[in-house]
Amino acid sequence: MRMCSFALLLSGIAAIPLRGDEINTSPLKVQVIPAYENLKWTGWSAEDEAGQPKALRPILLTSFGDGSNRVVVPIQQGTIHTFPSNASTEATNVFLDIEDRVAYSDKTNEEGLLGLAFHPKYKENGEFFVYYTNKAKKHQNVVSRFKRSANDPSKADPNSEEQLIVFDKPFWNHDGGTICFGPDGYLYIAHGDGGLANDPYGNGQKLSTLLGKILRIDVDHKDPGKNYAIPKDNPFVGNKEAKGEIWAYGLRNVWRMAFDRETGLLWAGDVGQDIWEEIDIIVKGGNYGWNLREAMHPFAKSKTPSEARPDLIEPIWEYNHDVGKSITGGFVYRGKRVPELQGGYLYADYVSNKMWALWYDPATKKVTANREIAAPAGVPVMSFGEDEAGEAYFTTFSLQGKVLYTFAPEATK
């Protein structure tokens, strides 16, 4: 069987069906290489205070966006590191340490410090935003504003925290955690459906809860009783039965979303449950079907499984659990170092260690290519990230501290 047809059988089809021979599934001539090989993580030890192994778990890679060309890497246990984007860099600087308020355990490893976003005007106002699981209260996630230290601009002020949104959830898993600024200057927040399995409370379809949603808030203004404002053009503003913060719903557990620097489209990888993983383009007011549907299929364990409906937005791509069992969403590559990746959406599967770049035509709403990238064995992709120049990286966990990888054109022989 041709690889193209095999990929369609296992990996799903575009929102508008294509014949198998119209989708390019040829492997990419791109190599994965370690990044910052000499880097030492200041303050990190491979053992905790009790002498137990403590893996380094970088949850993201981003930048300040201030022209300094510095890389920023938050660690799931509660620290944020920064260092110059130079391959020879030897040590990180601890930008913020909030381990005292972040809940993380290997047994509940969907919790912790999960998201980080710098204000578009960070250079001027020194503001940034952190999404973390609150150690002070069980099953609670928090989105908070922090500020750069007035005394040392290379560090943040841990005492500057201002909580914006608090999510109380019934279970420890499905925390979501991505926060990012859109081209409109608003902060977008992804939270999972509340956890366990099957979405037992139906949160994905409930507009009365923030769980199972993508939110959109204005961090530069404040509504009465809030530390943020709800944009007046949010889709459910004025609906007494809905939370005004909601931008999109019907999502299970978005693990990484990102805006395309060029088109402004919001991409999301939504982790599936029984059979299907999916990639979505998120739009205003969109209902992505969970838990009525799992990707492009009725969800059999739902109380009301549904066939495709006009009011339920289908993913642009899906793959089933013969291919992988937990999608790690990425972003659309707009860098210069690897021309072969230009315009491709990078994503991976955390369980199978497979990795791809996917091309999508917004005009025709068709996926035109889904090309595999040869990934190193035994290196699960926790998260993708991009530096200030738009170059691509991914993170993994390790007891040796070698946790950052990047991409390069395939070496010529």
Image (tube, rainbow, N blue to C red):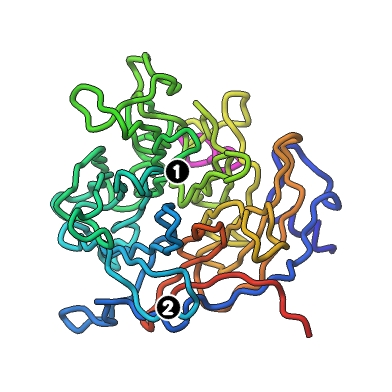
Q: Can you give x and y, in whole percent of width and height, for residue 150 in the image?
A: 19, 53
Residue type, mark 1 in image:
Arg
For residue 6, above or below residue 191: below
Q: Residues within 10 Å of mark 2 (few under 14, many from 20)?
A: some
Query: Which range is magenta?
Result: 292-302
Observer-nearest of 64 and 22: 64
Q: Quadrant of residue 336?
A: bottom right
Horizontal side, residue 90 vs residue 329: left or right:
left
**Which label sits on residue 252?**
1
Element type where label 1 sits in the image = loop
- Magenta stretch: includes residue 299: yes
> Magenta region, mostly helix, strand or loop?
loop
For residue 336, above or below residue 160: below
**Which label sits on residue 89?**
2
Residue type, mark 2 in image:
Thr
Q: Earlier in the sequence, mark 1 or mark 2?
A: 2
Horizontal side, residue 60 vs residue 264: left or right:
left
**Image quarter of the N terminus:** bottom right
Frontmost of labels 1 and 2 is 2
Q: Quadrant of residue 112?
A: bottom left
Give the residue drawn at x 42%, y 69%: 84
Q: Residues within 10 Å of mark 1 (few under 14, many from 20)?
A: many
- Magenta stretch: includes residue 312: no
Observer-nearest of 246 and 389: 389
Q: Quadrant of residue 43?
A: bottom left
